[in-house]
Amino acid sequence: MKHWVLFILLCLTAPSSFAANWQLDSSNSNLNFFSIKKSTIGENLSFSRFEGNLNDKGEFELSISLTSVKTGISIRDERMKKLLFDVTNFPKAIITAKVQQSHINNLSIGMHEKLSVPMKLQLHGHVSTLTANVTVAKLSDKTFLLTSVQPIIVNAQDFKLDAGIEKLMKIAGLPSIGEAVPVSFTLLFKKK
């Protein structure tokens, strides 16, 4: 039960070799995170609502609705929204990045490029800089896929979420919930 992120997140890169604006196709994308409770029980969790875009200046933004957290158990979803994320005051997590377009300008259809992209994650009223190792694959002149090469580790303490984790542990009667959460993603972008 602790989980979050985002975050997330994850990050961006993207071929804007084509000097166009790109819109995230969220229905064909996913954003997942993994949590460990009781030191040995792992759980796959996700967010179902997020939107993003990349403009022709290489500016990337991904907005994640924290109210869309999915754990597979409705009462746990509600507890995470209220006790961990505090969605009344912090309904979204935002990831921003600047993409160096030169890395992908010459990407041919069917080809891919691995990149390391610094990004900023805004979560629970705090901002932290993370790095995402991603692969950008050009599927066509109008679509590209952005995937995490390895999970991004989001630490609860960096966003003052540790108090929320303590509340979740108490209400669920758990001895522990991990505070370092791996986040992975597959994001499909389409030319506007």
Image (cartoon, rainbow, N blue to C red):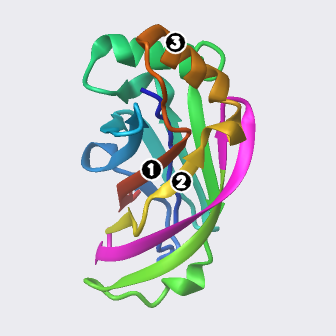
Q: Nearer the viewer, residue 130 or 43?
A: 43
Evaluate whether residue 173 shows in this view: yes
Callouts 2 and 3 close, C-beta under 8 Å = no
Q: Nearer the viewer, residue 85 or 182?
A: 182
Q: CA distance from mark 1 to mark 2?
A: 6 Å
Q: Residue at x 53, y 53 (%)?
A: 153
Establish if 69 lies above or below 136: above
Q: Earlier in the sequence, mark 1 or mark 2?
A: 2
* Residue topped by disc 2: 153
Residue 141 colored magenta?
A: yes
Q: Nearer the viewer, residue 147 or 85?
A: 85
Q: Is residue 2 left or right of residue 130?
A: left
Magenta: main secondary structure: strand
Which is closer to the viewer, label 3 or label 1? 3
Q: Residues within 10 Å of mark 1 (few under 14, many from 20)?
A: many
Evaluate whether residue 17 shows in this view: no
Q: Residue at x 56, y 74 (%)?
A: 116
Q: Secondary structure at mark 1?
A: strand
Check the picture and name the quadrant holding the C terminus: bottom left
* Residue topped by disc 3: 170
Residue 163 got which mark?
Answer: none
Indicate the position of residue 189 as horizontal and vertical percent values. Answer: 37, 59
Establish if 145 lies above or below 25: below
Q: Nearer the viewer, residue 174 or 150?
A: 174
Q: Residues within 10 Å of mark 2 (few under 14, many from 20)?
A: many
Q: CA distance from mark 2 to mark 3?
A: 24 Å
Callouts 3 and 1 close, C-beta under 8 Å = no
What range of the chain is rendered magenta?
121-142
Indicate the position of residue 105 as horizontal and vertical percent values. Answer: 49, 85
- Inspect the image, locate mark 2, and give the three-letter code of the amino acid beneath it: Ile
